[in-house]
Every structure is written in C-alpha cells, then in structure tokens.
Amino acid sequence: MDYKIALIRGDGIGPEVVGEAVKVLEAVGRRFGHTFSYEEVLMGGCATDAVGKSYPEGTAEKCKACDAVLLGAVGGPKWGSDRPAEERPETGLLAIRKDLGLYANLRPAKLLPPMADACPLQREIAQCGIDLMMVRELTGGLYFGKRDRYKTNDRGVEASDLLTYSELEIERIGRRAFELARLRRKKVSSVDKANVLETSRLWRSVMHRLAKEYSDVEYEDILVDNCAMQLVRDPAQFDVIVTENMFGDILSDEASMITGSIGLLPSASIGDSAPGLYEPIHGSAPDIAGQDKANPIATILSVAMMMRYSFQLPDEAAAIENAIDSVLAEGWRTADIASPGDQPIGTQKMGGLICEKLC
Ligand code: IPM
Ligand code: MG
C-alpha cells in the first residue's frame, strides 16, 4: 500500500527525532512492501520565524490531504508567553487538534522490562509492572472554553476560563476508552472531580451509562486527586484511564514520569476520521537540540502507533516495538536513559540500530 504522511518536524530536537522516524518508516516499507511519501508541513516556532505565525494558513488542509501526521516537537523559550498568541507554538498545537477533530489523545505509559531500573518508584512497586493507557479528551474543557480578562471596581483585574463539556463530547471519548480496554485487560478507570464540579457529575453519569453497555469491561470512578496518589502508590492497578482535557494533561505527565523514561513514550491523537496525529510526549528540549543527543525512541514508537491506529497494520507496529525492545535489551542507551557507567550513543546511531533489527 501507499501511505502519505505529513511531517511536522518542528523545533528543538523535533527535526532530529523525526529524521530517525522516517528512516524507520523506510525500513518498515522495505520489509513489508509499503511505500510512504511525505509532505513537509511548517508549524511551531520555526513557522513563526519563517512567516510570522506558528500555524500558517493552510496547515490543516495540508494535513487533511495526508493519511496521518507525524509531529516531532514544537516550542521553546524563544517563543514564550510574552509573544502574541499567533506567534506562540502552543497556539498552533491547540489549533491543529481542533481543526483535525482529534478529540482522543492516547498516551500509553509502559515500563519496558529492560528499563525497570529507571523506574523512580520503590522496587516492590516497580516489580508489579506498569502498563496503562491514558485516554485524554483533547478538544474540549478548559483548553477551549471562553476566556476573559476584565477590570472590576473593587477587586482589581479578574480573569476567567470557562469549563464546559457536552454529553456528546463525553460519550465519544468514553466509547474510545471502553473499546481500547476490550483489546487490553478490560478495565476502565474514569477520572473526575464529581464531588465539586458539575461537568464532572455529567461526565460520571455518561460514563455509567456506557459502563452498562460495555458490561464485559470492569469499570470504576476515581477522583482526580486520589488518582494522582494511586499512580505512585500502585500503578499496576490501572489499565485504561479516561479523563477530561486538563486532568489528562497533568496525570499523563505523572504517568510518564513513573516509567522513568519520558524519552520512550509515544502518543496518538485521533478523531472519527483521518488523519490522526502522532507525536512523542517529550518536548522540544532546546538545550540539547542539534547535538545528536536526543532519544528518537518515543517518536519511533509513535510511528508504531500510527501503523496500529491509522493504517490498521498491527504486524508492522509489533515489528517496530520488538526492534526497540531488542536494541534496549542489548544495552544500547541514549544519554537520557543511560545508567552511570553506560557509554551513551547518539540519536542517529539509535535510529540506525532499530532500522537494522527491522531488516
Ligand atoms: C501536552 C502539552 C500541551 C497541552 C501544551 C504544550 C499546550 O502540555 O500535549 O500535554 O497542555 O496539551
Ligand atoms: Mg502536557
């Protein structure tokens, strides 16, 4: 088959890690008989520098003409919050999520066996394993609610961000979570703050309706503060966690940290139609950009998710994941995951080793 992939290389280490992911795509193509073609799409701080806007006109259309989007990373201190909104890379990120209808953000957090020592939790906890899928609602809630800032007579300036969720938005993300759980260990933990927020009470009632429909899947409600605690106390209890946008932003960082290796974690953002967007969860790491130090594995695992969720190619996805497992099992490490005494390898060498395993 032929697949067309939009490449948003972005800022910082983005271009380097996407470069290695493209090498892996080519290796997969050779092994399984697919051809991949690429459309370069400018977005992020580099777009601000080139054309004055982080999300140039036509970005969404270019992506929509492709079967999937691969994004390296966008952002950096050069384009900070003192800049006008259209020059900030985050603005582009939120716009592309909304314009492509990417309401479901899948962030797996898995402790790979060769990386068990990197887990910052106590050994007894790490030994129970971590293999969870965070399903974060991505196009609603506080991120997209009405914002305001105005002067009051007696309280100085006041600001407000509106938190809204509809049944439709909750139901479609809930269904994703239950469907995913059916392919895994069949448990959904739905995170909310129903003891305080009305949006959470609606969230919970919709989830309960779905839980009855998916009665083969175990279901639980968990309050967000308790979930934050349980993630460090006993992460093995979780299979699929589903939550709204803001809680998901925070908890997914926590979940990634307990695996001890943020450089290894991919993500997928999908909607009801193509293209889905795939990106590593780490940022643009400007401090190591251009030095061949970045870990390309999270981006390469994002390509594996692309194979699985956008192209329905599970064998290709598994081949990529197995290639990475064997390279790690042989002891190869980039600097971010190296232990004292390891001789770290660079971005390109890591990408090359993974490609060799795919041949
Ligand atoms: C993420 C990031 C973004 C978010 C920022 C950069 C806008 O933290 O993808 O988790 O909050 O969604
Ligand atoms: Mg975040």
Image (cartoon, rainbow, N blue to C red):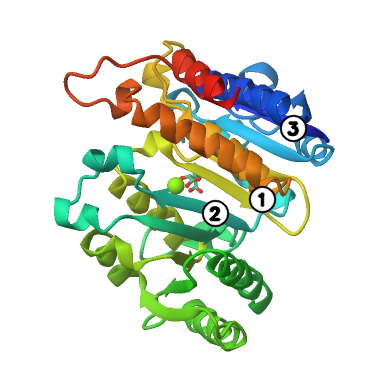
Q: CA distance from mark 3 to mark 1?
A: 14 Å
Residue type at numbered disc 2: Leu
Question: Disc 2 on helix, strand or loop?
Answer: strand
> Is 289 positioned to the left or the right of 334 in the image?
right
Residue 156 visible from this viewpoint:
yes
Name the spot of residue 258 as percent of width and height, x first: 29, 49
At x 15% / y 56%, what residue is drawn?
124
Can you name the residue that lies furthest to the top here? 291
Q: Pointer 3: residues within 10 angstroms few (<14), some, or many (20+)?
A: many
At x 60% / y 29%, what residue is drawn?
44
Mark 1 or mark 2: name the one nearer the start of the chain. Answer: 2
Residue type at numbered disc 1: Tyr
Mark 3 or mark 1: name the one nearer the start of the chain. Answer: 3
**Does the closest atom of ligand 1 sit within 8 Å of the Cβ of label 3?**
no
**Does the closest atom of ligand 1 sit within 8 Å of the Cβ of label 1?**
no
Mark 3 or mark 2: name the one nearer the start of the chain. Answer: 3
Q: CA distance from mark 3 to mark 2?
A: 19 Å
Residue 309: numbered disc:
1
Q: CA distance from mark 1 to mark 2?
A: 10 Å
Residue 106: numbered disc:
2
